[in-house]
Amino acid sequence: MSDPDADAAGRVTRLDAAARDRIAAGEVVTRPARVVAELLDNALDAGADRIEVAVAGDGTDRIRVRDDGHGMGRADARRAVERHTTSKLSGAADLDRVGTLGFRGEALPSIAAVSRLELLTGAGDEATRVTVDRDGERRVEPAARGPGTTVTVEDLLYNRTPRREALGTERTEFGRIAGVVTDYALCRPRVALSLTHDGTETLATGGGGPTDAALGVYDRRVAGESTVLDATATVGNVAVELSGTLAYPAVTRASRDHVRVAVRGRPVENPPLRRAIERGYGSLVPDDRHPVAAVDLTLPPAAVDPNVDPHKRRVALRPGGVADALADAVRDALSTADLRRGAAVATDLDAGLAPAAEGAFADARVIGRYRGLYLLCEAADDLLVIDQHAAHERVVYERLRGALADEPVPSAPVDPPATVALSPAGLAAVEERTAALAALGFDVEPFGGTAVRVAAVPAPLGRRASPDALRDAVDALRAGETADRRAALLKEFACHPSLRAGDDLSDEAARALLDALGDCERPYACPHGRPTVLALDETTLAKGFERGATRMD
Ligand code: ADP
Ligand code: MG
């Protein structure tokens, strides 16, 4: 205890530098995936366009990250592995506006404290190799390498037996690494990123932008059926840029892991922002499914505090309301994106997606019907195929939603009244929620035992519900009355077979359906996210029939 402040009689002593280093290392290096994230941060901060990550085994054997960034001169390379050395901050004031992914100057020394680390870096025509072996012995020597940096980490956590033993299986740990690389690949779509496991490439993006990144991470379907988000919003006084990829609502996943958020190019865990993206999809995605989306939010550095988490995976945003702006941007992007499944119909013919024309349905002319299920319409250069049932469900859903917000759903008398048997709990719900049922268009009263008498049913759009639809409505009401539940109820209700449009629509009814669909906020998907409209454009047909591109008069 050589510390001059230490009082011989005291219990509180100051830790020495070695102890402090080991404690700090414990915060940074919890598992191989953390090391990969820190090395990716460094490569991105160095302005790399291409980053290759190679992993052996579960990552404790070897992790190598090679980048084509600006590299380091010899003096910097030597200093980089020392604690609290960074090129990214010059003082405490800079912490209020961190513009880089790294800023603490502790990743490389922390990793070096629990592994064998080699830093091979080139800048200008000088290249340097710095090695830190297991005893912390450092060697700096000239080397050969073009511009850029390669960091190799071996025997990770060799001196942290409990932590190493707490790691999952190779599969689990590599899965975590792949998750990290995927997050970065999607939020940095202009960087070509690849991941190799035991010599096999498992993921690679080309650096061509959001759609390209989606193709590298997912597949043709996700990349083809997605729209690019590129918007700005002002929140408080702060300008927020929103960019990324939103897969169409028909592409969903059972887990929410595919909804990714990044802030200033840093993947973050931020449940409110993730939920905001899901809110933006709203009723387009079924309740038990989740969308596939990756959004990066760019705010000025002063609006983001990345210094709230040892792993820098959480950030604090200064203006409130960013989540709402995000939900709105997602909603807008999806409602202006062409959700007509042009590509799905015409993939063989190699057609692209065209943006939806404003008022597409107003100009559409019904030219026929197919199998009593589909309306065929001519709209500008497109042939639209409309699924009558799906379209009708969307219309009913939006109307019900609107009606429920302001006024009751129109209803029609049932004469003579019908009797519907419910469960005892259902009966209790009817007694408690008579007003809510009335707002949905049901006039119901107890009729002895568990039966109820239905004197009126919902009749939106001139179609009457069957009295049996009461059971679905009651079930949904019983499940609770939060906003989500109400939306679910409305969806169920809108899709109830008894509310469906008849199969043989008259010309007027078909026209009315088109107009009603055109008035919808989100005409291109039914309440459960299935498409309502497929479009084939004329050039697609011309290509398919091997005609010239010009129209034949
Ligand atoms: P931080 O990133 O917080 O500054 P690190 O310990 O991760 O701290 O890195 C220390 C310094 O080493 C960085 O500030 C940077 O100057 C340099 N450095 C690390 N990795 C790279 C790299 N891949 N390319 C260029 N410079 C790097
Ligand atoms: Mg760093």
Image (cartoon, rainbow, N blue to C red):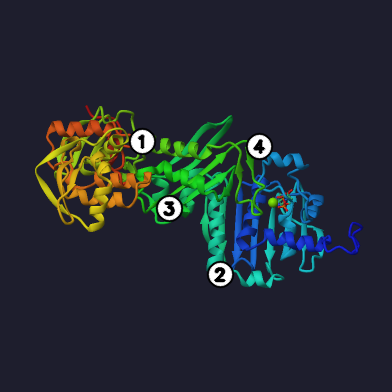
Q: Are marks 2 and 3 in contact (CB under 8 Å)?
A: no
Residue 401, above or below 66? above
Q: Amino acid at mark 1?
A: Ala
Give the label on residue 219, or none. Answer: 3
Quarter of the picture holding the C terminus: top left
Judge depth for marks 3 and 4 and give the one in front.
4
Query: Total marks drawn?
Result: 4
Task: State which tag comes first along the sequence, 1 or 3.
Answer: 3
For residue 36, side relative to residue 526 (left or right): right
Q: Which residue is the site of mark 1?
A: 354
Q: Is mark 3 within 8 Å of ligand 1?
A: no
Judge depth for marks 2 and 3 and give the one in front.
2
Q: CA distance from mark 1 to mark 3?
A: 21 Å
Residue visible at 75% across and 43% down in the picture: 89
Give the label on residue 170, or none. Answer: 2
Task: State which tag comes first along the sequence, 1 or 2.
Answer: 2
Task: State which tag comes first along the sequence, 2 or 3.
Answer: 2
Answer yes or no: is residue 200 visible.
no
Q: What crowding class fits label 4: few (fewer than 14 Cα within 10 Å), some (14-19), or many (20 or more)?
A: some
Between 403 and 395, the one lying in front of the other is 403
Which residue sits furthest left? Answer: 416
Between 452 and 149, the one lying in front of the other is 452
Q: What crowding class fits label 1: few (fewer than 14 Cα within 10 Å), some (14-19), or many (20 or more)?
A: some
Q: Are marks 2 and 4 in contact (CB under 8 Å)?
A: no
Q: CA distance from mark 1 to mark 4?
A: 39 Å
Between 101 and 196, the one lying in front of the other is 101
Residue visible at 34% across and 50% down in the picture: 480
Quarter of the picture holding the N terminus: bottom right
Q: Secondary structure at mark 1?
A: loop
For residue 261, side relative to residue 391 (left or right): right
